[in-house]
Image (cartoon, rainbow, N blue to C red):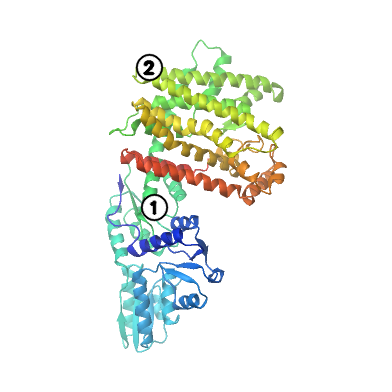
């Protein structure tokens, strides 16, 4: 069970800051964000992606530009600087903080000493201090009161909006005790929204074994919320989605109640993304565990007592490879089948296992074509046979035997289908669609094999983006995303119209998946991704290649492309992709496809449960490192 507090996420002031900043970024050029408008990396990254320039040095902002003043507020001297240098500004300071600034300025001008209770290095406190000529005493605890030597007869005590009530009460009591001879005006300016979030979060996290507090590591209100929640359930401060994955991978979450909450600097929409990622990953982990157990049992049936030792040994090699997969395609089959079912069913499991076996078969063929040595973190079948027969002299034999095993896998996958779904009324349609997916995958493989040779020896580097995208559509999108999902829907009886709609929706996701693979193939190590980093050696036609070869780095890249690379060579290639802009352009294109898919999924008329799973899945694909 997942619990959410009744009140959580961005307060009105923070929401206002984000909304105003987004609106400005859409309609104005040369916009600068002066320091972080909120302590939330997701929000900052979003604004950067929309063209907002981040700076911590006001001198970098040119005349005529516009800056965003952050929600925490700034001191009076900044406004004076902006007016003097003809710099426009959008003031997104929280209204509650503006009220504090006005109070401090008024009392300071009336000869009051100012004491601010809050964190000395917090931007809100620094900004507030700027409205009394930076003369305020800052107290983080009652111990700081001891260091105050001299005060005027009249004293204003005010506080940071995001501190906790206990801290405020403790420090004010120490001030009143030490300076009982002074006229002390105390104003509790703790934000009401902050208090409401804390109280609501306590009620929710009491019901959970684990609580995930979403927000930036620098966010004071997030840290306070984490400290409070941790008193009632084991809590984790989560500042990014990778951090959430790292935490939940190490927790036992079966039938476990959890709570998600967030402080006033984290938009609710961002919390939803974390919740969906959690839903996906726990669902996916359970599915993967279930299917891996079933596939290992299924693999035992590949051999029988009548097989001789040559066949037994060969099929054992295939069986060993036919496990420990990512089961991403299986997830798509499962979701496609269960899309609108009220109760989740395991009926599609053997369709998933059939597809996993087809995947293993085509990977065996891939390994022959690419001369790969690793697959799924294991030695490839050609390598195993080479070692058996004595190295490179047996390469032809090893490849021939591997080819036979790949062929075995194709027909074994069909056998699994017929054994488990032969009496299903949609069986003929499943087989027909399945064969079309296989044919599309092979068509993509043909282009993928042909184009590098043609590009290298005959085409003078004239490859077009459409040709690369055609490989991605046929070899990856059909095979990894579109095909599995559609097969799952066909098993439950989807109409041709529905299938066409799903094909259109998920094709961009498959292309994005392959672009991510291209990036990982160059920028990750072989141990992480479980296969050789050989896209460069094999002269693969990738989107990185396309963009780099349309830059001044073309000749430099040609020194390495198609060659076996040392570690230092690979570092140079990586630098070429970065310096040429190929990396950034590829990431930008990939992200546009991810976002296109999210928009399409949002419009789907499916159950919320599976819509959330699909959103979580897309997030997972964006984050994956293998």
For the image, the number of numbered tags is: 2
65 vs 495, left or right, is: right
Can residue 432 be seen in this snapshot? yes
The circle on residue 190 is none
511 vs 285, left or right, is: right
Q: Residue at x 43, y 42 (%)?
A: 597
Q: Considering depth in this image, is 142 or 454 the residue closer to the camera?
A: 454
Q: Quadrant of the N terminus?
A: top left
Mark 1: secondary structure = helix
- Residue 309 found in image quarter: top right
Q: What residue did someone put label 2 on?
A: 422
Q: Residues within 10 Å of mark 2 (few under 14, many from 20)?
A: few
Q: Considering depth in this image, is 331 or 88 the residue closer to the camera?
A: 88
- Residue 155 found in image quarter: bottom left
The answer to whether residue 122 is above or below residue 486 is below
Residue 79 in the image, given as x and y percentages of width and height: 46, 76
- Residue 10 found in image quarter: bottom left
Residue 525 in the image, given as x and y percentages of width and height: 60, 42
Q: Residue at x 43, y 49 (%)?
A: 244
Q: CA distance from mark 1 to mark 2?
A: 45 Å
543 vs 107, left or right, is: right
Q: Residue furthest top?
A: 306
Can residue 217 be seen in this snapshot? no
Q: Residues within 10 Å of mark 1 (few under 14, many from 20)?
A: some
The answer to whether residue 21 is above or below residue 292 is below
Residue 380 in the image, given as x and y percentages of width and height: 59, 28
Q: What residue did someone put label 1 on?
A: 270
Residue 50 in the image, given as x and y percentages of width and height: 48, 56
């Amino acid at each position: 069970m997942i619990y959410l507090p009744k009140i959580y996420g961005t307060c009105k002031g923070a929401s206002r800051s984000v909304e105003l900043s987004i609106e400005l970024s859409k309609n104005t050029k040369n916009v600068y964000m002066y320091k972080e408008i909120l302590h939330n990396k997701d929000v900052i990254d979003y604004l950067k992606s929309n063209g907002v320039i981040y700076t911590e040095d006001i001198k970098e902002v040119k005349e005529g530009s516009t800056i965003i003043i952050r929600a925490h507020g700034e001191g009076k001297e900044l406004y004076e600087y902006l007016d003097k240098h003809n710099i426009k500004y959008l003031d997104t300071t929280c209204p509650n903080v503006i009220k504090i600034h006005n109070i401090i300025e008024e009392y300071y001008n009336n000869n009051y000493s100012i004491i601010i209770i809050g964190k000395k290095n917090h931007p809100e406190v620094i900004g507030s201090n700027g409205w009394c000529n930076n003369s305020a005493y800052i107290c983080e605890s009652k111990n700081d009161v001891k260091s105050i030597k001299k005060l005027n007869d009249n004293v204003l005590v005010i506080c940071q909006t995001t501190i906790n009530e206990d801290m405020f009460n403790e420090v004010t009591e120490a001030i009143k005790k030490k300076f009982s001879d002074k006229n002390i005006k105390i104003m509790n300016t703790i934000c009401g929204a902050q208090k409401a979030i804390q109280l609501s979060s306590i009620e929710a996290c009491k019901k959970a074994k684990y609580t995930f507090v979403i927000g930036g590591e620098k966010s004071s209100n997030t840290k306070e919320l984490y400290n409070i929640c941790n008193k009632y359930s084991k809590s984790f401060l989560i500042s990014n989605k990778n951090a959430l994955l790292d935490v939940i991978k190490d927790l036992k979450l079966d039938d476990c109640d959890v709570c998600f909450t967030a402080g006033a600097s984290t938009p609710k929409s961002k919390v939803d993304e974390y919740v969906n990622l959690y839903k996906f990953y726990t669902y996916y982990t359970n599915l993967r565990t279930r299917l891996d157990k079933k596939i290992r049992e299924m693999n035992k049936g590949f051999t029988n007592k009548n097989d001789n030792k040559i066949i037994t040994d060969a099929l054992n090699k295939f069986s060993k490879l036919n496990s420990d997969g990512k089961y991403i395609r299986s997830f798509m089959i499962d979701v496609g089948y269960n899309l609108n079912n009220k109760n989740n069913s395991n009926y599609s499991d053997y369709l998933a296992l059939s597809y996993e076996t087809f995947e293993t078969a085509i990977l065996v063929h891939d390994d022959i074509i690419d001369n790969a040595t690793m697959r799924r973190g294991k030695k490839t079948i050609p390598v195993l046979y080479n070692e058996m027969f004595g190295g490179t002299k047996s390469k032809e034999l090893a490849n021939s035997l591997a080819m036979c095993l790949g062929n075995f896998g194709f027909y074994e996958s069909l056998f699994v289908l017929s054994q488990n779904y032969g009496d299903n009324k949609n069986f003929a349609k499943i087989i027909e669609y399945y064969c079309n997916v296989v044919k599309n995958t092979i068509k993509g493989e043909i282009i993928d094999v042909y184009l590098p040779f043609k590009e290298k020896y005959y085409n003078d580097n004239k490859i077009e983006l459409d040709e690369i995208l055609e490989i991605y559509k046929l070899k990856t999108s059909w095979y990894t995303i579109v095909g599995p999902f559609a097969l799952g829907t066909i098993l439950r009886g989807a109409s041709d119209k529905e299938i066409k709609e799903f094909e259109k929706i998920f094709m961009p996701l498959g292309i994005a998946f392959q672009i991510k693979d291209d990036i990982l193939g160059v920028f990750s190590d072989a141990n992480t991704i479980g296969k050789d980093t050989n896209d460069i050696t094999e002269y693969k036609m990738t989107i990185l290649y396309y963009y780099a070869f349309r830059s001044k780095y073309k000749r430099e890249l040609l020194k390495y492309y198609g060659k076996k690379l040392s570690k230092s060579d690979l570092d140079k290639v990586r630098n070429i992709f970065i310096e040429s802009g190929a990396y950034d352009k590829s990431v930008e294109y990939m992200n546009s496809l991810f976002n296109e898919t999210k928009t399409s999924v949002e419009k789907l008329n499916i159950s919320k449960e599976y819509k959330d799973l699909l959103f979580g899945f897309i997030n997972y694909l964006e984050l994956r490192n293998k």
